[in-house]
Amino acid sequence: LSAAGAGRDLAGLRVLVSTGGTREPIDPVRFLGNRSSGRQGVAVALAAAQRGAAVTLVAAHTDEGVLATVSGQRHIALERVSTARELEEAMHTRAALSDVIVMAAAVADYRPVEVSSHKLSKEAAGDGVRSLDLAVTPDILRALVADRANGQTIVGFAAETPQNGETLVDRGRRKAARKGVDLLAVNEVGWSQGFESEANALTIIDRAGAVLNDVSGTKRQVADALWDAIVVTRSR
Ligand code: CTP
Ligand code: CA
């Protein structure tokens, strides 16, 4: 692959990036969420803009300090969302006008079936185990792939904790095939790995399961390597 971040090689491209973690409300003060800081997706958006692309960044809950690095960037339009539903709507509205879509958002897989209009109280529930009914959220990436326009490139992200003897790459290959994405960027996460940090390691896998790159560095360096892989994929 070429050197990271060479010139304005993305000029003329319309890019749609999602980032951050969705929050699914339980009641007015509580939600189901995840540990995503939005850092990697923001780095992907900043790298694209610097390389000449016109970028729309759809940000679910993102660290405010991280998001501040986007404000004032002339070539990044920012839209903020909260739930998986809102993210789905924002992505669908913009997908058809995008040459490249990167789904870096951490989308909640489930949402509470019922959202209480008042704060749930322990007093009403009593002691002991409680359960919460959950519904599956829409798979936004899969729907984008199903509606993919001619010449459009769709990239997914996957944060994995290798398990059952399967390697990170094996899991990534299966997910890339299942999702039908052009590229899948896989990173290993754990209790003390992959979140909140400035550094990241990504394995970039194509639809056929080939490993295009194995890169580690700052989230910005990793983002540039991802754009290099996207450029190569679009040119063949
Ligand atoms: N994704 C999505 N909509 C969802 C869930 C995930 O668009 N409801 C996207 C993510 O943004 C990411 C990719 O799908 O780009 C892979 O997410 P991941 O959570 O790894 O995949 P899942 O199919 O949810 O599988 P898992 O059971 O491993 O969570
Ligand atoms: Ca998931």
Image (cartoon, grey):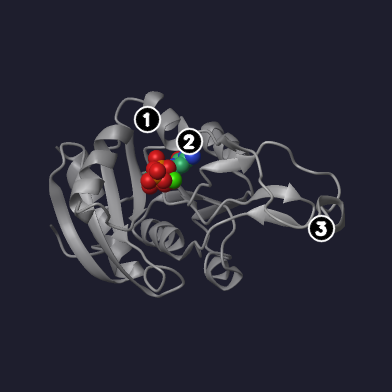
Q: Indicate the amino acid at tag 3.
A: Lys
Q: Is mark 3 within 8 Å of ligand 2?
A: no
Q: Is mark 2 within 8 Å of ligand 1?
A: yes
Q: Indicate the amino acid at tag 2.
A: Ile
The residue wearing badge 2 is 140
Tell me the number on the disc at residue 145: 1
Tell me the number on the disc at residue 122: 3
- Left or right side of 206 for 139: right
Which quarter of the figure is the C terminus placed in?
top left
The answer for how far apart the CA atoms under marks 3 and 2 are is: 35 Å
Q: What residue is shown at x 38% (from left), y 68% (from top)?
A: 194
- Left or right side of 146 for 180: left
- Left or right side of 80 for 136: left
Residue 79 in picture, x, y percent from top left: 60, 50
Q: What residue is shown at x 41% (from left), y 70% (from top)?
A: 191
Q: Is mark 1 within 8 Å of ligand 1?
A: no
Q: Ligand 1 is located in which of the four quadrants?
A: top left
Residue 177 in picture, x, y percent from top left: 25, 35
Tell me the number on the disc at residue 197: none
Secondary structure under tag 1 reads helix
**N-terminal-most mark, 3 or 1:** 3
Q: Is residue 83 above or below residue 126?
A: above
Q: Is residue 142 above or below residue 222?
A: above
Which quarter of the figure is the N terminus placed in?
bottom left
Q: What residue is shown at x 58% (from left), y 53% (from top)?
A: 60
Asked where in the image residue 134 lies, by quadrant, the reply is top right
Crowdedness near tag 1: few (<14), some (14–19) or many (≥20) residues, C-alpha within 10 Å: some
Secondary structure under tag 3 reads helix
Q: What residue is shown at x 56% (from left), y 32% (from top)?
A: 93
Q: Are marks 3 and 1 in contact (CB under 8 Å)?
A: no
Of residue 2 and residue 212, the one placed in the foreground of this image is 212
